[in-house]
Image (cartoon, rainbow, N blue to C red):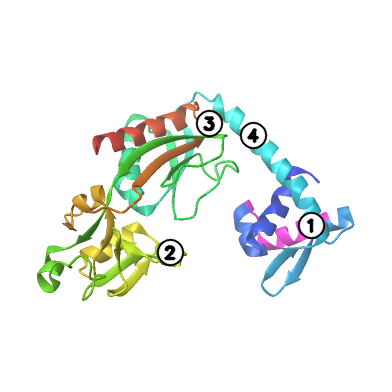
Amino acid sequence: MNWDDARVFLAVQRERTLRKAAKVVGLDQATVGRRIAALEHALNATLFFRASDGYALTPAGESVLKAAEKMEQSAHELARQAQGVDNRLAGEVRVTTTDSLALAFVIPAIASLHAEHPDVRVQLSTSTQMLSLARRESDIAIRTQKPESPDLVARRLARWRVGLYATEHYLRRHGEPERGTGLSGHDLVLYQPFLSGNSRPTLVGEPIHAGRIVASVHSSLMLRAMIRADIGIGEVPVHMGERDGLVRIWPELSRGSAYEVWLVTHQDLRHTARVRAMIDAIVARFETED
């Protein structure tokens, strides 16, 4: 098996359909199917079950998976090390972050970078899904959690308290909630992952059992938009609530855990000129907001 075969094999294993795998590796669907068939013929083994819900590995495929992942790791390490000594302020930098942080910080940082280094091209991905720096899906990640991998270099950009917010218009209509009532009589908008946890959800420590959950979202940007639209009250990082002109309810109370923002890159890439320039622009943008 060569690296090209391993790359196609891994794409099918991860995406589970030929169509999605083809998009990942930049080939057409028919070519991916032929490559998998040729690989199975060369190895004299069936690597995938073809099921109605997609492709799944056979026992033979499971054994091939470990070897393919080792090849991928070596290929990415080679590319990172080569890129790490690249002193050109030109070429592509891939950045991944959330939509909220992209609008407030990363896009202005890209504008600053472009003004100074117009030959650097940025590929920006905004999603709650964490792309892999080790697999070179991204060069820089702006995340709300610190990674544990020793191969990654992390720098904390911000640490904000999280408060409870509403609009002035909402509070005129509904009044300010009373502490100890479980937010009785109030409409709530929540971050969906908090509802999916094992513990009972609260807002800045206040139980919400008596409130009415109007909507839940997977994006902090959408959560803030719903609060601004008078749909309900919700938790927002204090820095962002102030930017949005929202009214903080119970200013003395905050969520138990702060909202942290981390800049993460692979240690092999942090000295690449274009990656370093993008990092510096992002850091400068956050520093202007302190």
Query: Residue 69: x, y in percent?
Result: 71, 46
Q: Residue furthest right?
A: 44
Query: What residue is shown with label 3?
Result: 269
Q: Is residue 38 magenta?
A: yes
Task: Specify whether residue 227 is painted magenta.
Answer: no
Q: Are marks 3 and 4 in contact (CB under 8 Å)?
A: no
Real-space CA distance between mark 2 and mark 4, rounded to the nearest whole angstrom: 40 Å
Residue 61 % position (x, y):
79, 57
* Residue nearer the viewer, 204 or 133: 204
Q: Which amino acid type corresponds to the residue marked 2 in the rendered image? A: Ser
Q: Nearer the viewer, mark 2 or mark 4?
A: 2
**Quadrant in which the C terminus is drawn:** top left
What amino acid is at disc 4? Answer: Glu
Q: Which mark is residue 61?
A: 1
Mark 2 = which residue?
Answer: 199
Q: Amino acid at mark 3?
A: Leu
Horizontal and vertical percent for residue 153? 49, 33
Q: Work out how far the residue at label 3 is from the one at label 4, CA to CA, in angstroms.
A: 10 Å
Residue at 9% across, 69% down: 172
Upstream in sequence: badge 2 or badge 1? 1
Numbered tag placed on residue 77 in the rendering: 4
Tell us which disc is closer to us: 2 or 1. Answer: 2
Q: Residue type at mark 1: give it.
A: Gly
Q: CA distance from mark 1 to mark 4?
A: 24 Å
The residue located at (52%, 49%) in the rendering is 131
User: For this view, does 150 lie left or right of residue 36?
Assistant: left
Instruction: Tell me, yes or no, whether the two marked residues, 3 and 1, touch with CB atoms within 8 Å.
Output: no
Q: CA distance from mark 3 to mark 2?
A: 39 Å
Mark 3 or mark 1: name the one nearer the start of the chain. 1
